[in-house]
Image (spheres, rainbow, N blue to C red):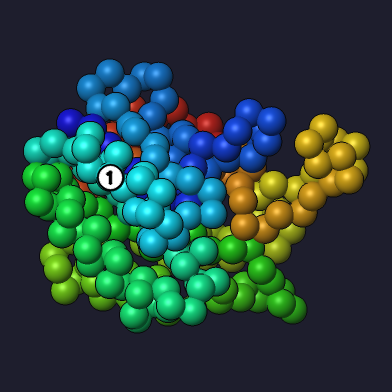
Amino acid sequence: MKILLAGDSTVAACPSYEYPMSGWGAHLAPETYWWAAVHNHAKGGATTESFRAEGLWHELLHQTVQGDLVLIQFGHNDQKREHLAARTGYTDNLRRMLADVRSKGGVPILCTSVERRHFTAGRLDVTLGDYPLVVRKLADELGVAVIDLNAWTRNLYTELGEERSKELFFHVAPGEHSHWAGGLEDDTHFHEKGAKRIAVFVAEQLEALGYGLASSVRVGAQV
């Protein structure tokens, strides 16, 4: 069995010069796994449309065989394009992806988008509109498992609070990072610490679905 990931930068492995910025998919397959390879096809800036147009979806499907798991998480960039609105183009593209995976004998699993860390007057904002909702509805309609990363990350940021939740994200001061010499406060992309914590949750959810991964995850991403 393989695990194949389709998604955007919050899932993708970042280039080495951006370290320790990271997507959660980069930490789903520690070296301790010996029976389930993880193939991370996620790409920064990807939408449900560009992922297919650039050939990434074709490449993923070409590798998919009977029983493989295909985790799909989009929304952050679809949200920026009018024709990929949550209830129209975005849902249509996800529906097609699910059919494609099933036609290959794979097992599709939808993931709602991780939330951005935006607080107003101490309260966490909703930044993804209807995108998480339509993923949940589509999963229910088509009998597909869903990992609700949006709900879970919202709860996590709220529990940690506005200040402590910064540690999950990529915040560097001027002079601390060679690529961002002027500093960066990014509340969308994760620090490796946050990405690892999300990967642990994804593995636990896969185990709950009967795929037994959590016991192999190297846990150590606690804030």
Q: Give left or right: position of 162 versus 87.
A: right
Circle 1 — which element?
helix
Question: Can residue 164 be seen in this snapshot?
Answer: no
Image spot of residue 141 (x, y percent): 16, 74
Residue at the image position 22 percent from the left and 63 percent from the top: 96
Q: Which of the 4 image quadrants contains residue 91?
A: bottom left
The relative height of residue 124 versus residue 168 in the rendered view (above or below) is below
Image spot of residue 68 (x, y percent): 18, 38
Amino acid identity at mark 1: His
Residue at the image position 13 percent from the left and 65 percent from the top: 143
Image spot of residue 16 (x, y percent): 63, 28
Image spot of residue 153 (x, y percent): 50, 59
Q: Give left or right: position of 144 versus 82.
A: left
Q: How many marks?
A: 1
Q: Which of 48 and 223 is in front in this view?
A: 48
Q: Nearer the viewer, residue 93 or 150?
A: 93
Q: Mark 1 points at which residue?
A: 58
Q: Which of 201 and 78 is in front in this view?
A: 78
The relative height of residue 2 versus residue 126 in the rendered view (above or below) is above
Residue at the image position 9 percent from the left and 45 percent from the top: 105
Q: Which of the 4 image quadrants contains residue 148?
A: bottom left
Question: Can residue 135 be seen in this snapshot?
Answer: yes
Q: Give left or right: position of 100 versus 112.
A: left
Q: 10 Å neighbourhood of mark 1: few (<14), some, or many (≥20)?
A: some
